[in-house]
Image (cartoon, helix red, strand yellow):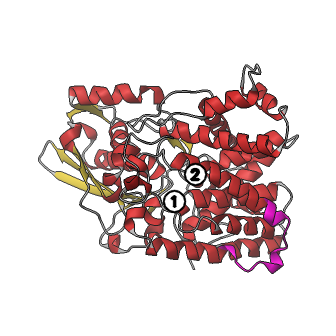
Amino acid sequence: MAHEAISVFDIFKIGIGPSSSHTLGPWRAAQQFLQYISNQQGLQQVVNVQVLLYGSLAKTGKGHGTDIAVQLALCGYDPVTFDVNHITSEIEKITAQQKLLLGGEKEIAFNPSTDLQFLVTESLPFHPNAVSFLAQFINGENVAQTYYSIGGGFVVQEEGREETRIKEQGARSREQNTGNEKQQTNSPLPFPINNAEELLHWCRKTGLSIHEVVMENELVWRSENKTKEGVLNIWKVMMDCTYRGCHTTGILPGGLNVKRRAADLNKKLLQNKNYNNQKEWFTAISEGGNSFQYILDWVSCFALAVNEENAAFGRVVTAPTNGAAGVIPAVLLYYTVFTKNITDDKVVQFLLTASEIGSIFKKGATISAAMGGCQAEIGVSSAMAAAALTEALGGTQRQALMAAEIAMEHHLGMTCDPIGGLVQVPCIERNTMGAIKAITASQLALQSTPDFAKVSLDAVVETMWDTAKDMNSKYKETAEGGLAINIPLGLSEC
């Protein structure tokens, strides 16, 4: 069976909140469309651009900032480098002037209220997250392209009639790389992996740990030093995001009036200790004790901080999505802060292992909440973190896979029902729960013998996909079911 080559930098992407599928994905799709029309006749020949959002992108796009992402992308900005402090001013300028500078080169008329349409009653068959771009050139010619944001910032472009195939795997060969760029190569991966059984096969055959197998595959695209450098940069962005979130107060945008909690919890736990930077902050935290309640509070605080930043259009890392971006940083910070003498190599190992588990779920099921509900986001991130923590703490490859299975098993069926279409309630708190479940799953696996396990990771992946297909669409990031309809807007006490 053909295998899909997914890099650690495909799973972990630097971007802007609040959603990898509704913000980062459409942003990347718009960039691809810019490149397409540039290749056709050039941006200088464009006189008009329209954007059509379908399905989940239309139903929750406002709350997820899809319209904002598309406009910034059309202006030529990149989510990795764009200054998040300028988001509001840029969008207000486009709205006021009803113009945008296409690709940073050609000024065109653009009225967001008419040129960017939310088609809430229409959906395309391939995937709920669909966006079409239409452009008109000076010579009167019109072109159109349709893209699907299939979760985690991955983007698929429509080709022919293949969009009628429902399962994501049908278009995997057409995915566009949207993370840190991989060197183009026709060389096969030394260890092709589609599922957990194949991963375990290579570990048994070579004696390598999971992270070592992943690193060997990464060498096809870049040197070991480059991979380590990139992974440590991912970790730096995660830490920066957590630090900002733990020191920023106020109300989250969007109209739900959700109060930030991480900064107050950070202050309470540290009891007014003085520190001047991240390093001193981590030291202050570690010196505060190691009681169960203290550590539990910090894991929750880390996760809250990241996803409050995400909800506020801050810079985050998909892990594997934005909505679940807080789980892995929280668990990795738990590991690095409360375990002594953790090196950069241990951090790299943790993230490499986590990425492979995320890759297995993407190949065998989905990491899109619009396809699978929140089990596809928080559930997958918890499984990733559980496996990575288990291996980091000295567990075997089989114990790591067992930890991932345990974590996901207890997220099966979790719905995605964001109130107001915002990635806030219940999304932010769910990251704390996913992190705690990951730690618990890891401890269970470390104290268990995989020989006696009744459920395999592959069985859980298959079950998750079956559950996703059976789940009612109103529980798949549409804000049409669950808490989204039972909690009146503006009345949440979160």
Whether 58 is drawn above or below 125: the answer is above
Q: Which mark is residue 430?
A: 2
Q: Residue at point 65% right, 70% down?
A: 192
Please say whether residue 215 is one of the residues in the magenta stretch. no
Q: Are marks 1 and 2 in contact (CB under 8 Å)?
A: yes
Give how far across and how far down residue 308 sits, in percent: 54, 38
Element on which disc 2 rests? helix
Circle 1 — which element? helix
- Please name the residue shown 84% across and 70% down the image: 448
Tag 2: amino acid: Arg
**Residue stretch rendered in magenta on the structure:** 443-457
The three-letter amino acid code for the residue at tag 1 is: Cys
Q: Give residue 6's position: percent from left, percent from top.
A: 59, 61
* Whether residue 432 is situated above or below residue 187 in the rendered picture: above
The quarter of the rendered structure image containing the N terminus is bottom right
Q: How many marks?
A: 2
The residue closer to the viewer here, 221 or 197, is 197
Q: Residues within 10 Å of mark 1 (few under 14, many from 20)?
A: many
**Res 356 quadrant in image:** bottom right
- Which residue is found at the position 63% from the left and 29% from the top? 264
Circle on res. 374:
1
Magenta-span inclusion, residue 449: yes
